Image: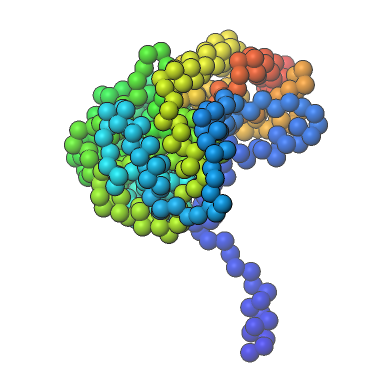
Amino acid sequence: MSELKTATRTQLPSVSARGRLVPASPIRKLAPFAEEAKLKGVHVYHLNIGQPDIETPAVMREQLKLISEKTYEYTPSAGTKAYVDSIRKYYAGLGIPLGTDEVLGTTGGSEALQFAFLACADSGDEILIAEPFYTNYRAFAAIAGLEMVPLLSRGEDGFHLPPREEWEEALTSRTKIVVITNPNNPTGTIYAREELEMIAGFCRDHGLFLISDEVYREFVYDGARAVSALTLSGMSDLVIVVDSLSKRYSACGIRLGALCTRNKAIFEAVLHMAQGRLSPPGLAQAIAPAAASLGPDFYDGVVSEYQKRRDILYEGLTRIPGVFLRKPEGAFYFIARLPVEDTEDFARWLLTDFSLEGGTVMLAPAAGFYVTEGRGLNEVRIAYVLKGDDLLQAVKILAAALPAYQKARGLRD
């Protein structure tokens, strides 16, 4: 018996299959190289991650100072009444009425997505999605045991949705969910109502849930408008909308989001999951309702600033030989094609081997935003979340880095 115990102790348990399937984030995987560059005194311009440098609204920061409770207690699992009502008021301002049993507070949009995946499908089921897509969906799907079935969207088409016949071809008996991101991360595309009606018809005809990630709803440019899936006809029982305060109010660190659905069974299932994790962040919910006092001027100013940043990068990068991108319509990201074969190698080289005037740029290699092997190898996702002067310098660095990299790798004389 003692020999058996001794033998057992020497056998290390293996990581679960689920754990092995969760991919590393292409947004953060090169972070150690960025930290090493900073230790060498190199200034790193972070275009890899959607962390805005715009201040969180003062009314929210001031609200934090007014919290007087001496014990930070659990809140209701679905969120405090004040927070849920603030989300309902926000949607009512968009002409979308929602009841108290149709909005659930979550720990960021990420938890809302994870809850939605778990509530709408069983292990082994499939999600249809146009690629490239927000890379963390891959992690959420792996955790839920779901398979992502990609349909290709193309940069030459502005990354708009593939036609319905391609969705029909991808459909199987295991398909349970369609996921869209509108406005889109990572492409900056805004889907027109006609595209959304096409997807809605597809979901209605086949009884599929439509999960719509709408966290960038305010970030639309050139007079465009983002249409919420909650306004699509005949979809009340099929739509789940994921929302977040992170980008809308430049408050990524408070980790507060929401899941909205009119499907009572889905809401109840998600509520039970929420009860299992007890409650969303209490301090975040205490300050979030203060955002309701922000008027249209706040959104107009933020959107105008991001449009200027978009234009700086678009105009600068399109002047660099070999770089291709379409002008993004919304959010604050785009996918750019670079004149290199392996953008992960290029992104790493930027951090380890190159600097200009004391600075370098961090990019997110785009292969991780695809499921299909081999796609996105010559693309990067860029986030235009830095002030204009920083973006101009980033363009200058990239313009010098690309030919230097090509020469270093023997791709040119």
Split into 4 quadrants, where in the image is the N terminus? bottom right
- Residue at (56, 13) in percent of width and height: 312
Q: Residue furthest bottom?
A: 1
Scheme by which the image is coloured: rainbow
The x, y position of residue 227, in whole percent, is 31, 26
Lateral position of residue 136 relative to residue 8, left or right: left
The image shows residue 241, relative to residue 142, as above or below, that is: above
- Residue shown at the point (43%, 36%) measured from the top left: 289
Tell me if 359 is positioned left or right of 90 in this view: right
Any part of residue 60 in sight = yes
Q: Is residue 74 left or right of residue 1?
A: left
Residue 242 in which image quadrant: top left
Residue 197, given in percent of the width and then of the height, sits at: 24, 29
Count numbered badges in the picture.
0
The C terminus lies in which quarter of the figure? top right
317 in relation to 257, above or below: above
Residue occupying image coordinates x 53% and y 49%: 69
